[in-house]
Amino acid sequence: MNVIQLIDSLEAGGAERVAVNYANALVTHIDHSFLCVTRAEGILKQTVEKEVGYFFLEKRSTLDVKAIIKLHKYVNRHHITVVHAHASSYFLATLIKCLNPSIKLVWHDHYGKSEFLDQRSKLVLRLCSFSFNQVLCVNSKLVAWCKKYLKIKNVNYFPNFATINTTKLRTQLKSTKGKRIVCLANLREQKDHINLLSAFIKIQEKYPDWTLHLVGKDFNDTYSKSIHNFVKRNKLQNSVFIHGSCSDTSAILNVCDIGVLSSRSEGLPLALLEYGLTGLPVVVTEVGYCGIVVKHKVNGLVVKAESSEDLANAIERLIENETLRIKMGEHLHKEVKKEYSKDAVLRTLLNKYKAL
């Protein structure tokens, strides 16, 4: 079995991390594991294992004929049997299947705006779905949507898994040890950092020595500017630190004390699983699979989305109770190790490949 993971970039996003995790993990379980990055390399390239067959396609446009032919030849040359396309790479994967009809095509739906599926474009995806052999979705809402709109019956929920990054701490955290809140999320609107910052203002009033660390890609767009302006306008420069993309995320999480996700919408965020692997107590919004993983008051605290007051109250509860923090962090760690570990997910993935 020769499997290639197909992903548009290697920026530090959830789908991108999953594609790399799969390519790395499959090395010792199948004949050959490959990773094709279609449009742009990024910070995650350094996490790709040397045993993975790595291919950067340098695709310039949606219908880049040269790139399509190049990938077609690569698939033939390496006798690829399964193309596992992540997120928006499904269109290219469909073209490759048209040129190589014998391959099996798996599409992995990581769509992060699962609370707003009524706004999702579906015409091209629906047409491409005729070529899919299997669809894997990161939460049950996506499963229901795909079964309703796509031309394929083989649609299943499939959990993400996270891994520990062994890179040593390089990011400077100018803050007091034992009083750090972290949010691991790219600066995108659906992550609702403004909601978190509004909640943090309330935290600062009572606990001025606690700090907030935002870790994730800064796209330097309008939304990013709104975050930076909010920090300046509210004089939070000495307590809110925007670190951008970091290659030492696991090390950062290990020296933080509370993990937060304030999203308006999610699938199954890899950041949450990474919080669990490092034993962080968490506060998350009730979107996507966050509440299912966390289980309110068991593995962490779950609050209503877009409510800075609820978010602040939950964070404050963890700040005030170190025993509760330790207990919830341990419970989340056990949950993630049991249900979202590499070994458990990989066994199921291999079975799905074999059944194609």
Image (cartoon, grey):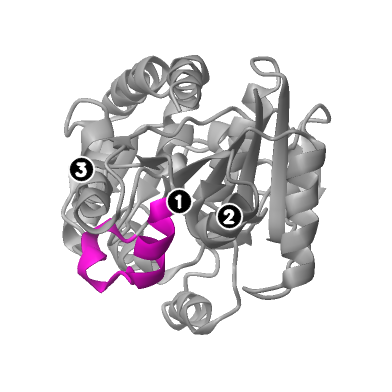
Of residues 55 and 46, the one nearer the viewer is 55
Quarter of the picture holding the C terminus? top left
Which secondary structure lies at badge 3? strand
- Residues at marks 2 and 3, CA–CA distance in whole angstroms: 45 Å
Which secondary structure lies at badge 2? helix
Q: Please say whether residue 118 is visible from this viewpoint.
A: yes
Q: Determine which of the numbered discs, if any, sits on residue 98 in the image.
A: 2
How crowded pointer 2 is (Cα within 10 Å; few <14, some 14-19, many 20+) is rated as few
Quarter of the picture holding the N terminus? top right
On the picture, is 138 further left or further right than 11?
A: left
Q: Determine which of the numbered discs, if any, sits on residue 302 in the image.
A: 3
Which secondary structure lies at badge 1? helix
Q: Earlier in the sequence, mark 2 or mark 3?
A: 2
Q: Which residues are magenta?
A: 113-130
How crowded pointer 3 is (Cα within 10 Å; few <14, some 14-19, many 20+) is rated as many
Pinpoint residue 275: horizontal percent, then vertical percent: 45, 34
- Is 230 contained in the magenta span? no
Question: What type is the residue that disc 1 sits on?
Answer: Ser
Q: Which residue is denoted by mark 1 in the rendering?
A: 131
Q: From the viewer's perspective, is residue 356 above or below residue 247?
A: above
Prevalent SS, magenta region: helix
Pinpoint residue 328: horizontal percent, then vertical percent: 29, 25
Q: Earlier in the sequence, mark 2 or mark 1?
A: 2
Residue drawn at 83 percent across, 30 percent down? 50
- Residues at marks 1 and 3, CA–CA distance in whole angstroms: 39 Å
